[in-house]
Amino acid sequence: MSQLTIFSASNANQALSNTRDAKQITERLNSVGVRFEQWQTRDGIAAGDSQETVLAAYDSDVKRLIAEQGYQSVDVISIASDNPQKDALRLKFLDEHRHSEDEVRFFVQGQGLFALHIGDKVFEVICEKGDLLSVPANTTHWFDLGPQPDLVAIRFFNNPDGWIANYTGDDIASRYSRLNA
């Protein structure tokens, strides 16, 4: 189940609020400019499936979002727990960074933990199968796919070159939650 936990950026030990209610998650994230939606998913997609298989299954949804938002490229991250590169991939996303474009993910399978550092708060969002999250350009954040990933996500980009991170050098991410599931 999706979950939103909000912390003060200066205190990772005490949550200011916590909810699993999709409507509340949507409202709280929308209030800080973050898009959160829940989409219908399709059975038969598993971690490790090819990009072609995943995109074919969600072709109409992908085309609709591209038409609506003007994305220039789309790819799929599909990683199972037996992937020999899982640890390196996890580390790539764990430090606080930002992008010059929106970061948009639709979770087809599995889960991931997005932490958004917005103003004086950290918004930890556990995204699961069916969740769409759009982090606005230049929002500092980090992402954890967990130590045993079972994740398939469609990623949408305004930049035809895809995912490009600008790391902040701040160690804030090390003080907050990690995905252990």
Image (cartoon, rainbow, N blue to C red):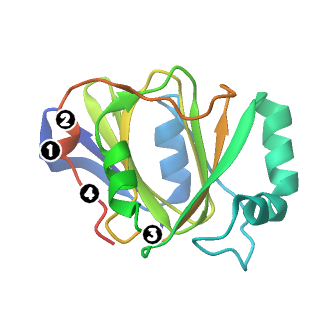
Mark 2 or mark 4, which has the lower sequence index? 2
**Can you see residue 139?**
yes
Characterize the local packing of mark 4: few (<14), some (14-19) or many (20 or more) Cα atoms within 10 angstroms: some
Task: From the top left corner, tell me how far across and down residue 173 is, in percent.
Answer: 23, 40
Mark 3 or mark 1, which has the lower sequence index? 3
- Give the residue type that dot 2 points to: Ile
Residue closer to the observer: 3 or 43 = 43
Q: Which residue is mark 2?
A: 172
Q: Which mark is residue 83?
A: 3
* Residue drawn at x 34%, y 63% as measured from the top left: 146
Q: In the picture, residue 139 is in which quadrant?
A: top left
Q: Which residue is mark 1?
A: 175
Q: Which mark is residue 178?
A: 4
Could you tell me how far apart the alpha carbons at marks 3 and 1 are, in whole angstroms?
27 Å
Could you tell me how far apart the alpha carbons at marks 2 and 3 are, in whole angstroms?
28 Å
User: Viewer-nearest of labels 3 and 1?
Assistant: 3
Q: Is residue 124 left or right of residue 27?
A: left
Mark 2 or mark 3, which has the lower sequence index? 3
- Give the residue type that dot 3 points to: Asn
Q: Are marks 2 and 1 in contact (CB under 8 Å)?
A: yes
Q: 59 above or below 151?
A: above
Count of numbered tags = 4
* Residue drawn at x 36%, y 44% as measured from the top left: 92
Q: Is residue 3 left or right of residue 155?
A: left
Task: From the top left corner, tell me how far across and down residue 14 is, in percent.
Answer: 14, 49
Residue closer to the observer: 29 or 113 = 113
Q: Secondary structure at mark 3?
A: loop
